[in-house]
Image (cartoon, rainbow, N blue to C red):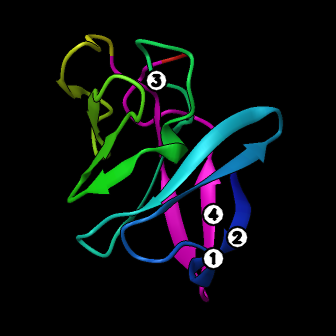
Amino acid sequence: MMIKICSTEDVPKGTAISADVDGTQIAVVHGEDDNFYAVYDECSHAAVALSEGEVDGCTLECWLHGSRFDLRTGEPTGLPATEPVPVYPVEVRDGDIYVSLTPSNGVTR
């Protein structure tokens, strides 16, 4: 089931927002490749919001210790994080962003 989160205009390119989707905190990211991504909004290393971090290409950097996560796979691409974060399917329909809460990478929080 896809849940409407926001308008594409709410997430400018190169930024991330946090959304509470049925009690799950999701970071919705507008990657520099012009695609939209959704990941669990908590670093797997420290309990801080990834949505407050920097978008760099197709990665999201945690602001606290600098861990980076691939937005496509959830895999960490930089230490200190070693565990992936859940990645959620995203669809853009008529200028709106929809997210499924079933992780596409099989990672649960």
How far apart in space, not on screen, are marks 4 and 2 (Cα)? 8 Å
- The nearer-to-camera label among 4 and 2 is 2
The CA span between labels 3 and 1 is 23 Å
The spot of residue 64 in percent (x, y) is 42, 26
Q: Amino acid at mark 2?
A: Cys
Query: Which residue is at 48% across, 77% downward?
Result: 12
What span is colored magenta in the figure?
A: 84-107
Above or below, 106 relative to 19? above
The answer to whether the residues at label 3 and label 1 have Cβ atoms under 8 Å apart is no
SS label for mark 1: helix
Distance between the Cα atoms at labels 3 and 4? 22 Å
| Image height of 100 relative to 98, above or below | above
In percent of the image, x 63 and y 76: which residue is there? 10
Tag 2 residue: 6
Residue pointed to by mark 4: 98
Query: Which circle's residue, 3 or 1, is located before the other in the chain?
Result: 1
